[in-house]
C-alpha cells in the first residue's frame, strides 16, 4: 500500500500542469456529480423494488382469491349434483335388469345431471365410480369402481373430511384439476364407497389467471408436495428466457416456500441471476400461487440510467479535457521557455538566459516576472561561483584545526582529571604504572610531527590507553589485534581509532565489567582500507542505530550524540569525509546484547592518504 501511494505521488508530481488541472476539475465537478447520480439511482432502485414487491404481493393475493372462488364453484357443483337423489340411487341398483327402466333413466335423471354439468363452463367431466357389479358403463358419468385409480384413495378422502382437491387429477393429470368427494347413499352397504370426481381443464380453470399481462412477474401454481407438478403460461417471456433452467429455478423456490412465512419474499440465486418470489398458500388445493421476477428485469430501468450517467459523465470529462488542454497550452506556452533554459543550465550552460522580449519600462505578467528573476539569478550565480571555492578552502582548514584542538584539549583534560580524583581517593603507589601509560598517551597525542602515523603506532597508543583505563576504572578490558606485518606499516590519520575504542570502553562494558575489543584490518577491491573495531558488549538500541546510520549516510541533519568524554564518532566521521571524500568515513553495525562493529573506511593507496 505504501509503495502504491509513493508511486501515485511520483506520477502526480511528474505530470504536466494541464493534467493536474484536469484532475482538479474532475475531482471538484465530475466525481461529486457521479456520486450524487449513483446515490439517486440506488434510491430509485430501492423504491422500485418496494413498489414491485407491493404490486406482486397484490397480484398474488388477487390470484389466490380468484382461485378460491373457482374452487367454491366446483364444490357447489358437486353439491348440486348430489341433490339429484334419483340419479345417485339408480346407479347403485341393478342397471342391467330392465331395459325400459334404463331408457327412462337416460331421458330423465341422466339428462338432468348432464344439464348440471353443461351449465358449469369450468367442468369438463363429472364421473361417479360405483362399487356396483350391475352398473352399466355406457356414459362417461358412470363407471365401476374398478376403473378408479388408486383403489385406496377413498381412505385419504375419509381422513380429509370426505372431499379433496388435486392440482393434477389421477386421470389426465398433466392437464386437469380435479375435485373428489365420497358418496354414501342411505341404505347402501358397499364394501367400497362411491367416489364422485369433477375434472376441470387447466386451460379453462386457469384461463385468465395465468395470462401474460406484460408485467415483470411470472405467475405459476405449484403443487405443495412437488415443484414439478405446476401450471403456468409457457408463452410468458420468463420461461422462454429461462429455458432449461426453469425447472431448477422452480425447484429452488419450492424448497423455500413456507406456509407460516407467506408475507416474506423468497430470494434465490441461479447462475449469475437473482430471483424474487411472492406466494400464497391455497390450503384446499395444497398448492402455492407464486409470482416470480428476476432482479435483472426489475432493475432494467435503473441499469439503463447507469449507462446514461456514465455516457454523460464521459462526454463531460472529454470536453473538460479539451478545454483544459487548450487553456494551458495558451497560458503556459511561455513557461516552456523557462523550462528549456533550466535544462540547459542543468547541463552547465550558465549563459542560457530567457528572451522575454520586454522593453526597458515593461514589467509583463507573472511568467515574465519569473523569467526576469531567473535571468538575475543566473547573473548572481556566476558572480558567486568565483568566491565559493576560496571560501570553502578557508572554512575547511579552519574546521580541521578546530576539530584537532578539540580532541587534544578534551582528552588531556579528562585524563588528568581522572588521575587526580583517583589518586585522592585511593592513595596508592601503583600510580607509577598508570603514569607511564598516561605519559605515552600524552606524548603520542601532543607530538604532531606528521598528520599520519603507521598503523602499528596507532595500535600501540590504543594498548597504552586500555592499560590506563583498566587501572583507572578497575575493569577488565581485553584488546586483541592480530594484524599482518605488511599492513602495520601503512600510514593512517593520527588519532582516528582511539575515539572509537573509547566509545566501546564507555558504552559497551557494564560498570566494573569486562568487554573484549577486537581490531581487524582488510582491503576491499584494492581501493579501500577497512579497519573494523568490534566489541562483544551491550550493543546499540535499534532505533538509536537507525538514527546513527542515517546521519552517517547523510540522510539526516540531526547530529550524532557524543560520548561521555566529549569525543564522539561525529568528529572522526567529519574529518575523514572532509579529507578523503564521501566514499570514506565510518559505518556502524550492531545487534543489541550481542556486538557493535565500527568500520573505518580509508583510501588504500598511501600516495592518496593525507593527514588531518
Image (spheres, helix red, strand yellow):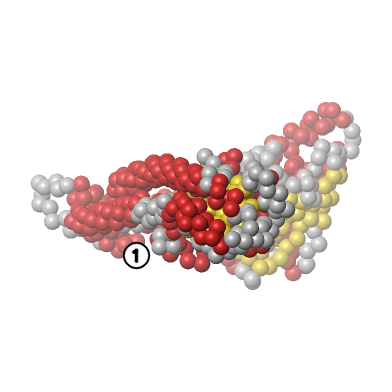
Q: Position of residue 71 (x, y in %)?
A: 50, 46
Task: Give the labeled residue for mark 1.
Answer: 347
x 52%, y 56%: residue: 105
Q: Is residue 372 visible?
A: no
Label 1, secondary structure: give it. loop
Q: Position of residue 468 (x, y in %)?
A: 81, 43
Q: Is residue 576 above or below residue 468?
A: below
Quadrant of the drawing holding the C terminus: bottom right
Is 356 in front, or is 16?
16
x 69%, y 65%: residue: 490
Q: Is residue 48 visible?
A: yes
x 65%, y 44%: residue: 186
Is 337 on the left-hand or right-hand side of 205? left
Q: Position of residue 486 (x, y in %)?
A: 74, 69
Q: Is residue 486 above or below residue 218?
A: below
Q: Is residue 411 above or below residue 585?
A: above
When asked about the image quadrant of residue 489, the answer is: bottom right
Q: Position of residue 412 (x, y in %)?
A: 70, 39
Is 515 in front, or is 481?
515
Is 73 in front, or is 207?
73
Q: Is residue 138 above or below residue 189?
A: below
Amino acid at each position: 500500500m505504501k509503495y502504491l501511494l509513493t508511486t501515485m505521488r511520483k506520477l502526480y508530481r511528474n505530470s504536466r500542469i494541464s493534467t493536474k488541472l484536469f484532475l482538479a476539475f474532475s475531482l471538484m465537478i465530475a466525481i461529486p456529480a457521479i456520486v450524487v447520480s449513483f446515490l439517486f439511482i440506488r434510491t430509485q432502485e430501492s423504491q422500485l423494488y418496494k413498489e414491485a414487491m407491493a404490486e406482486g404481493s397484490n397480484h398474488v393475493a388477487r390470484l389466490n382469491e380468484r382461485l378460491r372462488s373457482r374452487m367454491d364453484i366446483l364444490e357447489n357443483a358437486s353439491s348440486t349434483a348430489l341433490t339429484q337423489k334419483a340419479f345417485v340411487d339408480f346407479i347403485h341398483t341393478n342397471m342391467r335388469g330392465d331395459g325400459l327402466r334404463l331408457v327412462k333413466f337416460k331421458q330423465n335423471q341422466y339428462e338432468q345431471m348432464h344439464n348440471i354439468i353443461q351449465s358449469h363452463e369450468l367442468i369438463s367431466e363429472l364421473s361417479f365410480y360405483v362399487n356396483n357389479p350391475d352398473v352399466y358403463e355406457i356414459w362417461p358419468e358412470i363407471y365401476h369402481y374398478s376403473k378408479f385409480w388408486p383403489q385406496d384413495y377413498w381412505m385419504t378422502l375419509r381422513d380429509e373430511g370426505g372431499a379433496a382437491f388435486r392440482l393434477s387429477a389421477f386421470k389426465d393429470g398433466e392437464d386437469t384439476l380435479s375435485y373428489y368427494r365420497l358418496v354414501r347413499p342411505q341404505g347402501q352397504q358397499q364394501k367400497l364407497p362411491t367416489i364422485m370426481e369433477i375434472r376441470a381443464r387447466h386451460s379453462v380453470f386457469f384461463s385468465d389467471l395465468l395470462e401474460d399481462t406484460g408485467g415483470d412477474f411470472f405467475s405459476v401454481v405449484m403443487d405443495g408436495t412437488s415443484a414439478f407438478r405446476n401450471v403456468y403460461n409457457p408463452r410468458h417471456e420468463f420461461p422462454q428466457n429461462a429455458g432449461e433452467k426453469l425447472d431448477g429455478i422452480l425447484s429452488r423456490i419450492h424448497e423455500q416456500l413456507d406456509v407460516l412465512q407467506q408475507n416474506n419474499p423468497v430470494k434465490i440465486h441461479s447462475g449469475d441471476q437473482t430471483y424474487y418470489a411472492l406466494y400464497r398458500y391455497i390450503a384446499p388445493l395444497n398448492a402455492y400461487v407464486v409470482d416470480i421476477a428476476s432482479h435483472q428485469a426489475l432493475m432494467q430501468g435503473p441499469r439503463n440510467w447507469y449507462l446514461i450517467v456514465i455516457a454523460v459523465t464521459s462526454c463531460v470529462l472529454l470536453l473538460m479535457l479539451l478545454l483544459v488542454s487548450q487553456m494551458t497550452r495558451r497560458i503556459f506556452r511561455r513557461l516552456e521557455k523557462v523550462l528549456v533554459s533550466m535544462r540547459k543550465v542543468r547541463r552547465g550552460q550558465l549563459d542560457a538566459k530567457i528572451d522575454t522580449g520586454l522593453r526597458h519600462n515593461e514589467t509583463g505578467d507573472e511568467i515574465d516576472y519569473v523569467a526576469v528573476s531567473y535571468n538575475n539569478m543566473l547573473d548572481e550565480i556566476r558572480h558567486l561561483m568565483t568566491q565559493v571555492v576560496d571560501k570553502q578552502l578557508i572554512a575547511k582548514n579552519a574546521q580541521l584545526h578546530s576539530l584537532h584542538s578539540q580532541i587534544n584539549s578534551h582528552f588531556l583534560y579528562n585524563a588528568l582529571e581522572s588521575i587526580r580524583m583517583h589518586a585522592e581517593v585511593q592513595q596508592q603507589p601503583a600510580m607509577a604504572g598508570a603514569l607511564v601509560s598516561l605519559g605515552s598517551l600524552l606524548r603520542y597525542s601532543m607530538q604532531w610531527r606528521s598528520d599520519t602515523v603507521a598503523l602499528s603506532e596507532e595500535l600501540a597508543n590504543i594498548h597504552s590507553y586500555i592499560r590506563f583505563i583498566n587501572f583507572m576504572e578497575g575493569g577488565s578490558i581485553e584488546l586483541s589485534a592480530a594484524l599482518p606485518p605488511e599492513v602495520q606499516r601503512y600510514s593512517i590519520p593520527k588519532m582516528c581509532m582511539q575515539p572509537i575504542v573509547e566509545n566501546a570502553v564507555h558504552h559497551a562494558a557494564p560498570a566494573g565489567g569486562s568487554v573484549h575489543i577486537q581490531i581487524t584490518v582488510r582491503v576491499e577491491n584494492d581501493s579501500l582500507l577497512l579497519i573494523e573495531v568490534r566489541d562483544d558488549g551491550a550493543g546499540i538500541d535499534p532505533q538509536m542505530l537507525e538514527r546513527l546510520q542515517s546521519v552517517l549516510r547523510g540522510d539526516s541533519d540531526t547530529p550524532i550524540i557524543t560520548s561521555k568524554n566529549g569525543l564522539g564518532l561525529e568528529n572522526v566521521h567529519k574529518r575523514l569525509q572532509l579529507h578523503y571524500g564521501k566514499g570514506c568515513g565510518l559505518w556502524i553495525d550492531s545487534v543489541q546484547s550481542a556486538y557493535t562493529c565500527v568500520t573505518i573506511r580509508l583510501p588504500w593507496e598511501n600516495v592518496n592518504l593525507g593527514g588531518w
